[in-house]
């Protein structure tokens, strides 16, 4: 029997696993990434796209912490679009269509090259436990690997079952076997497990699509990249096509609903409301006679097309019938049928804010196993678990991301406080402080943290410090003097003529005023670079709102930062309902802020809790 020792072991080479492995290795600890097959690394189980609204924010935050997803997506991107371009920067989301093959190859390359990171092919079937703590893993070939922390990121593989119409077969995703032994082992560990499901559409052969009559969707002329280190796209850029379902498509689906795995009662798991199957759409939005479908090429040297919007678990012949009823797809050949997958997840309320399992020291969970859906959500959790598992090995305090500093913090707090009723996906609306949590300022919010944690490359440190120096210089120029409304009007800028003198930054806070407008007014500003000009504009636009928001945050933080000792006996707080006592016991909130967000928490109950915490001092 082989035996090796690492500091951190990551189980699963998906999006959570790779990001966790990179984060731990960057922190300088010996890290092993164990995955079923080396070629799993960088596989996109579903659509070949990264980012979008809320999700794009997560990718920028991962990048700001020197993670890999953004850089790899920039290399693989074949179409970049900034979603919500016409709305304010706070809700704009960068998105890229990725070439599946390039993404995978690039992710494998950076993972292989990362120092202190060892890739091991194998199936983890058991944990080594010493006392209560996880101290290693056992592989199916009998080898044992010991470590100080294990991060489990097994995605949709735990007791995964694939459904296509009436057919159900075990699978982790199409073409992969599920992880059964590990799921059985987890069920003996007293963890709260549940079942969720998700689905994917049939893949089409692009050569059999009649593109001629279809609307095309090009990417942006000036691509917005994910990484603060990337400067240009490298892959060939492509267009997507757009088509629509119609009455006939819906009729075929309605006639066969009882044959759909989702609707035939063969799946117990709960599916993602925000990513509905075409069956779901036809039933839930019965009044609509058509739904949009984006025809997304899966790569530049790949004929496979991903029809975004028609995920399904109908039988193969029904999938063919409804696909062929759609304009442009009349003769489309299906390369792989759509399917639904059902899998085990762990109720994330059993996790601490660092993603460690409360009842099993040394074990961390990240990704789809925690009830989320999406590559970006998985990778962001991987980052948190990777950093924290490494900190555990280094005997350093846990790193907690807050709701006021990141979307990552919003997600972790949502998951660990309220659990999930369906696969959790990020949206900008989940963040109450979204004016300050913008995709464009993720580096300003998080790169200083990455530098202080010691997980940041020299390249990023120097890029970041140059940017901050340039921003500082630009801000100094803008704030050096103030100008009367008359002086401002004299260079053609229209702002209110109220007699108040304003600095350049104040003038930029007016909607429609651009940096270029200020150049004739403020000496020296002509030498400020384009990127810095845009950043200063965005920062100025939100400055007043953010000042107010910051005051609210600090008032709230005073009380909310009060730590709740884990041993607090909630039954001893008289006046607290049984229901809330149970919820508090289950959630074990870290502080008053987290307690406040528990479903059903009332101001009165919070006051009782606050009084007790103050009394116990
Ligand atoms: P995964 O990417 O699933 O990676 C898990 C990894 O763990 C794999 O590499 C596997 O080999 C490895 N592994 C598992 N068990 C073991 C073991 N015992 N030992 C060693 N290695 C192991 N997301 C969306 O945002 N929108 C969608 O519409 C969507 N639809 C989807 C449809 C389907 C059919 C599937 C399968 C996924 C879909 N997803 C969708 C989800 C997306 O693929 C996941 O959210 C994302 O891949 C999760 O990342 P992860 O790292 O948690 O897990």
Image (cartoon, rainbow, N blue to C red):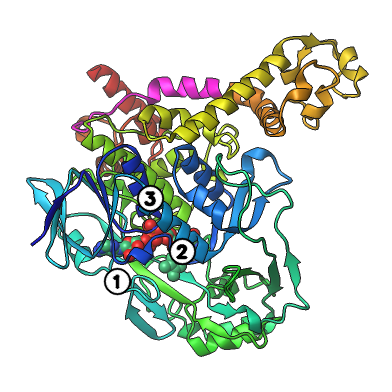
* Image-quarter location of ligand 1: bottom left
Residue 458 rendering spot, x and y as whole percentages: 45, 33
Query: On screen, 493 above or below 364?
Result: above
Residue behind mark 3: 113
Q: Nearer the viewer, residue 4 or 588?
A: 4
Disc 2 secondary structure class? loop
Q: Is mark 3 within 8 Å of ligand 1?
A: no
Residue behind mark 2: 44
Mark 1 is surrounded, within 10 Å at the Cα level, by few (under 14), some (14 to 19) or many (20 or more) other residues, namely many
In the image, 445: left or right of 484? Answer: left
The numbered mark, 1 or 3, whose residue comes first in the sequence reads 3
Residue drawn at point x = 45 percent, y = 76 percent = 339
Query: On screen, 572 above or below 187?
Result: above
Query: On screen, 184 above or below 537?
Result: below
Disc 3 secondary structure class? helix
Residue behind mark 1: 178
The Cα atoms of the two marked residues, 1 and 3, are separated by: 29 Å
In this picture, which residue range is highlighted in magenta? 550-568
Residue drawn at point x = 82 percent, y = 22 percent = 519
User: From the viewer's perspective, is the residue at label 1 or at label 3 nearer?
Assistant: 3
Residue 258 rendering spot, x and y as whole percentages: 47, 84
Disc 1 secondary structure class? loop
Residue 421 rendering spot, x and y as whole percentages: 40, 56
Q: Is mark 2 within 8 Å of ligand 1?
A: yes
């Amino acid at each position: 029997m082989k035996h090796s020792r690492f500091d951190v072991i990551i189980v699963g080479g998906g999006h959570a696993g790779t990001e966790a492995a990179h984060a731990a290795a960057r922190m300088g600890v010996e890290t092993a990434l164990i995955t079923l097959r080396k070629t799993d690394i960088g596989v996109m189980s579903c659509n070949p796209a990264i980012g979008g609204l809320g999700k794009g924010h997560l990718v920028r935050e991962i990048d700001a912490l020197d993670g890999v997803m953004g850089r790899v997506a920039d290399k693989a991107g074949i179409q970049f679009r900034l979603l919500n371009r016409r709305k304010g920067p706070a809700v704009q989301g960068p998105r890229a269509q990725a070439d599946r093959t390039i993404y995978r190859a690039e992710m494998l390359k950076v993972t292989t090259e990362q120092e202190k990171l060892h890739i091991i092919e194998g199936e983890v079937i058991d944990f080594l436990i010493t006392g209560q703590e996880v101290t290693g893993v056992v592989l199916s070939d009998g080898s044992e690997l010991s470590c100080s922390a294990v991060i489990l990121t097994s995605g949709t593989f735990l007791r995964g079952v694939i459904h296509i119409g009436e057919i159900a077969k075990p699978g982790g995703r199409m073409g992969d076997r599920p992880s059964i032994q590990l799921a059985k082992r987890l069920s003996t560990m007293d963890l709260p497990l549940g079942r969720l499901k998700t689905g994917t559409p049939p893949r089409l052969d692009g050569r059999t699509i009649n593109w001629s009559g279809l609307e095309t969707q090009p990417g942006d002329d000036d691509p917005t990249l994910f990484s603060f280190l990337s400067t240009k796209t490298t892959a060939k850029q492509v267009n997507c096509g757009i088509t629509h379902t119609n009455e006939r498509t819906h009729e075929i689906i309605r006639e066969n609903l009882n044959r759909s795995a989702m609707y035939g009662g063969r799946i117990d798991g709960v599916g993602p409301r925000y990513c509905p199957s075409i069956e779901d759409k036809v039933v839930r939005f019965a009044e609509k006679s058509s739904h949009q479908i984006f025809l997304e090429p899966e790569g530049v040297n790949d004929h496979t097309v991903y029809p975004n919007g028609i995920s399904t678990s109908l039988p193969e012949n029904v999938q063919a019938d409804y696909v062929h009823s759609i304009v442009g797809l009349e003769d489309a050949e299906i390369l792989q049928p759509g399917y639904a997958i059902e899998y085990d997840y762990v109720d994330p309320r059993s996790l601490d804010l660092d993603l460690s399992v409360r009842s099993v020291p040394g074990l961390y969970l990240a990704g789809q196993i925690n009830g989320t859906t999406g590559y970006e959500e998985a990778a962001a959790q991987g980052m948190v678990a990777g950093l924290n598992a490494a900190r555990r090995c280094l005997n350093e305090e846990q790193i907690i991301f807050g709701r006021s500093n990141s979307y990552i913090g919003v997600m972790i707090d949502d998951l660990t406080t309220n659990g999930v009723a369906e696969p959790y996906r990020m949206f900008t609306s989940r963040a109450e402080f979204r004016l300050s949590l913008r995709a464009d300022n993720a580096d300003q919010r998080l790169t200083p943290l990455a530098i202080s944690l010691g997980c940041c490359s020299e390249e990023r440190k120097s890029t970041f410090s140059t940017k901050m120096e340039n921003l500082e210089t630009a801000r100094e120029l803008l704030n050096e003097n103030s100008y009367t409304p008359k002086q401002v009007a004299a260079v053609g800028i229209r702002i209110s003529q109220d007699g108040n003198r304003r600095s350049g930054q104040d003038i930029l806070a007016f909607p429609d005023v651009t940096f270029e407008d200020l150049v004739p007014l403020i000496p020296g500003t002509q030498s400020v670079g384009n990127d810095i000009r845009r950043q200063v504009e965005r920062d100025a636009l939100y400055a007043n709102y953010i000042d107010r928001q910051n005051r609210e945050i600090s008032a709230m933080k005073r009380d909310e930062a009060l730590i709740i000792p884990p041993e607090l006996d909630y039954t001893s707080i008289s006046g607290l309902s049984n229901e809330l006592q149970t919820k508090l016991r289950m959630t074990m909130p870290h502080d008053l802020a987290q307690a406040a967000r528990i479903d059903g928490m009332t101001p009165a109950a919070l006051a009782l809790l606050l009084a007790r915490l103050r009394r116990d001092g």
